[in-house]
Image (cartoon, helix red, strand yellow):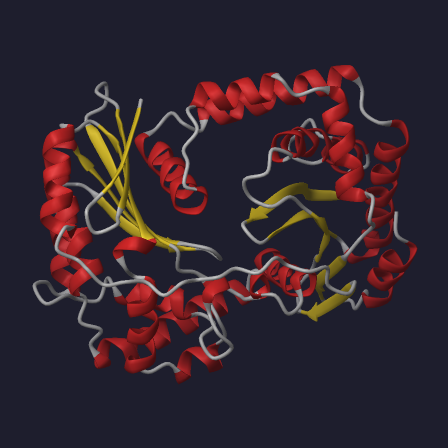
């Protein structure tokens, strides 16, 4: 059962007590991500995420690490396109320590200039690590091509040259604009005393009064169809295809998830069975939807020997054409719907996953749906709902195609974009 309220200084709080557990997960969420970054700020949200672990007015970076390790807890963070989350997971008896550490990092980080300069090197190495992962790189290139000039095209990590230009004043300016009480959510799931926890939240965050700037997200317009190839001295070729998706919060997300399960979302999906199991042409082939407040994208990925890229790409496009022409079977529909329910419920079996689901939805949509309500929505889905979303996703054709590998297949990608589905 969820409890939700807003503190006197504007912080949204959402709680779920799980008394059968001996742990608690606490998340501090901000609407701060790459979509809010200006042309000279790309990567700064992720940079700030790192800096909040580098020392406060009360603790050094080593102190932060030692205090959470001393109780066997976990303390970490992640940055996405539309949000940043700082979180900890501790035994229930140490929840006050977790709240103390998180609040100290968020409110009292010193942004020491020496640490800032050192962290530039750390993040640059992180960027190079992803550059060395062709599967990660091909997805980043796809977002850039699909979203074009919209901020959703921004790389979350930024670029080495941009990171090198950050200075303390610039970092603090962004931090002061977006790290504010009225731009955040505190999400807690696990075993806790609700009254004591509310007192802790007031004690650690109640005196915070900085006001946020008004962040406006513009809808992502349709970008021009585009292809991109990046050369890498590797054995495989990695290909991504992008189609229009569904915005976050839309009811169409449920039939889209069913469609994805049927098409490329798992080992029983059409893509996996046809391309990997029947033909043995790839090790990895899958699809997935990405939903944001300002836009959405449906992605198909495959990694293969360069000699098989033409055949694999043709098989993917043929499967899309077959799906649109002949539809799905009732057996596929029933199985994919049950699969969606099972994945959803099993994904809520930990305090961390419940904290994440609550925090993200409260931050971005200002609502948290109980699991029973979501299951009810899935149960009400019909065959026609799935076929309708199939036309929505694939009806306007292929919008972007990217590849990473040693053999340049730009012409193949361009042909796919030109011919459509």
x%, y% of residue 127?
47, 68
Q: Is 87 situated above or below 380?
A: below
Quarter where residue 339 is shown: top right
Looking at the image, residue 271 sits to the left or right of residue 131; the answer is right
Q: Is residue 77 above or below residue 160?
A: above
Q: Is residue 407 above or below residue 255?
A: below
User: Residue at image x 85%, y 63%?
Assistant: 414
User: Where's the N terminus, which quadrant?
Assistant: top left
**Relative to 324, 407 lies left or right:** left
Q: Position of residue 209 (x, y in %)?
A: 19, 60
Horizontal side of residue 175 vs 399, given as left or right: left
| Quadrant in the rendering for residue 189 | top left
What residue do we see at 84% from left, 37% from top?
319
Residue 388 at x, y = what percent? 77, 32
Which sits in the foreground, 18 or 3?
A: 3
Looking at the image, how many numbered discs can be counted on the residues?
Answer: 0
At which x and y percent is residue 129?
Answer: 48, 65
Residue 46 figure quarter: bottom left
Residue drawn at x 40%, y 82% as measured from the top left? 164
Q: Residue, x 40% and y 27% (percent of image)? A: 348
> For this view, does 399 lie left or right of residue 35?
right
């Amino acid at each position: 059962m969820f409890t939700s309220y807003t503190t006197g200084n504007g912080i949204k709080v959402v709680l779920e007590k799980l008394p059968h557990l001996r742990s608690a997960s606490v998340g501090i969420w901000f609407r701060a991500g790459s979509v809010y970054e200006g042309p000279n700020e790309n990567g700064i949200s992720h940079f700030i995420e790192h800096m909040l672990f580098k020392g406060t007015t009360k603790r050094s970076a080593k102190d932060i690490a030692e205090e959470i390790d001393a109780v066997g807890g976990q303390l970490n963070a992640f940055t996405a396109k539309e949000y940043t989350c700082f979180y900890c997971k501790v035994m229930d008896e140490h929840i006050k320590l977790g709240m103390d550490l998180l609040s100290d990092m968020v409110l009292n980080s010193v942004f020491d200039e020496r640490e800032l300069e050192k962290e530039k090197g750390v993040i640059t190495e992180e960027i190079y690590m992803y550059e060395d992962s062709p599967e990660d790189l091909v997805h980043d290139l796809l977002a850039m091509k699909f979203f074009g000039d919209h901020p959703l095209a921004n790389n979350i990590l930024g670029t080495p040259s941009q990171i090198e230009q950050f200075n303390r004043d610039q970092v603090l300016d962004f931090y002061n604009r977006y790290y504010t009480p009225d731009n955040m959510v505190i999400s807690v799931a696990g075993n806790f005393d609700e009254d004591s926890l509310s007192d802790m939240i007031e004690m650690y965050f109640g005196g915070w009064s900085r006001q946020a700037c008004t962040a406006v997200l513009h809808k992502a317009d349709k970008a021009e169809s585009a292809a991109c190839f990046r050369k890498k001295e590797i054995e495989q070729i990695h290909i991504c295809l992008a189609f229009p998706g569904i915005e976050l919060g839309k009811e169409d997300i449920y039939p889209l998830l069913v469609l994805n399960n049927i098409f490329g979302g798992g080992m029983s999906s059409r893509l996996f069975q046809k391309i990997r199991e029947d033909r043995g042409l790839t090790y990895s082939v899958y699809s997935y939807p990405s939903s944001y407040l300002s836009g959405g994208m449906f992605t198909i990925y495959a990694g293969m020997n360069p000699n098989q890229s033409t055949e694999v790409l043709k098989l993917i496009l043929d499967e899309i054409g077959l799906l649109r022409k002949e539809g799905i079977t009732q057996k596929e529909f029933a199985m994919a719907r049950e699969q969606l329910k099972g994945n959803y419920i099993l994904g809520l079996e930990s305090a961390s996953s419940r904290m994440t689901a609550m925090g993200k939805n409260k931050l971005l949509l200002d609502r948290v749906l109980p699991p029973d309500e979501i299951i009810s929505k899935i149960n009400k889905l019909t065959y026609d709902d799935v076929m309708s979303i199939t036309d929505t996703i694939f009806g306007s054709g292929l919008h972007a195609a990217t590849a990473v590998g040693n053999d340049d297949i730009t012409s193949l990608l361009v042909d796919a974009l030109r011919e459509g589905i």
